[in-house]
Amino acid sequence: MMVATLKPTGPGTAGLEVTNAGPSIARKVKVTFDPALPEHEHAEDGQESLIPYVRRRFAEPIDAWAPGYTTRSEFIRRGRNRDDQSLRTNVDGIPRQTTIVFDYEDDDGNSYTDRMSLDPTLVEGETWSVYKRTKGSQETVVRDGAPWGVG
């Protein structure tokens, strides 16, 4: 069973983790995106785009993907521009409605297709704790602040 998740990696950034979460080897794993990832080499902010690395990683089918093996790639960098819902857009031009698609086989030759949304809404909505510690007369505020914040 192939799965993909977005994990916060810093302020306004998230990585794509792709894992074989099943108990056996996934064979002939083809990874695509719907819609297809943008083709440019530079992001809207002028920096080198992260997307060519992701496209290269999954350009060819993977013959054998071991159970529990995970790949990680930086995938989302929020920019200053906002969409019609006032949410920040990805500087690499990846739409929020992007889906990752896995086509693969098991050892018996059975074919599978799994589709997973890569919408960053779940990452953006993360909230973390803030609490105070007191030692003697000194108070310290400890923040586990969500790296994306709101909006």
Image: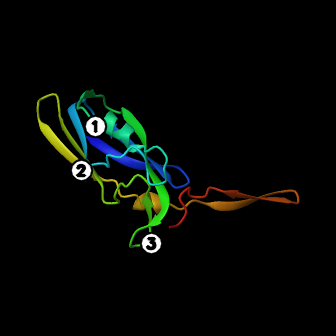
Amino acid type, label 1:
Gly
| Closer-to-camera residue (147/58) | 58
* Quadrant of the drawing holding the N terminus: top left
Report how far apart the C-alphas of labels 3 and 2 lie in the structure.
Answer: 27 Å
Residue, x 27% and y 41% (percent of image)?
Answer: 2
For label 3, the crowd category at 10 Å Cα-Cα, with few meaning under 14, some 14 to 19 and many 20 or more, is few
What element does badge 2 sit on? strand
| For residue 139, side relative to residue 6 (left or right) | right
Residue 114 is situated, as x and y percent measured from the top left of the image, at 22, 47
| Closer-to-camera residue (78/108) | 78
Residue 25 is situated, as x and y percent measured from the top left of the image, at 25, 29
Could you tell which of marks 1 and 2 lies nearer the N-terminus? 1
Residue, x 56% and y 55% (percent of image)?
Answer: 147
Residue placed under numbered mark 2 in the picture: 115
Residue placed under numbered mark 3 in the picture: 86
Amino acid type, label 2:
Arg
> Which quadrant holds residue 133?
bottom right
Circle nearer the viewer, 3 or 1: 3
For label 1, the crowd category at 10 Å Cα-Cα, with few meaning under 14, some 14 to 19 and many 20 or more, is few
Residue placed under numbered mark 1 in the picture: 22
Amino acid type, label 3:
Ser
Figure coloring: rainbow
Circle nearer the viewer, 1 or 2: 2
Q: From the viewer's perspective, is residue 24 above or below residue 119? A: above
Residue 33 is situated, as x and y percent measured from the top left of the image, at 26, 48
What element does badge 3 sit on? loop
Residue, x 68% and y 61% (percent of image)?
Answer: 131
- Is residue 144 among what the camera can see? yes
Whether pointer 3 and pointer 1 mark residues with C-beta atoms closer than 8 Å, the reply is: no
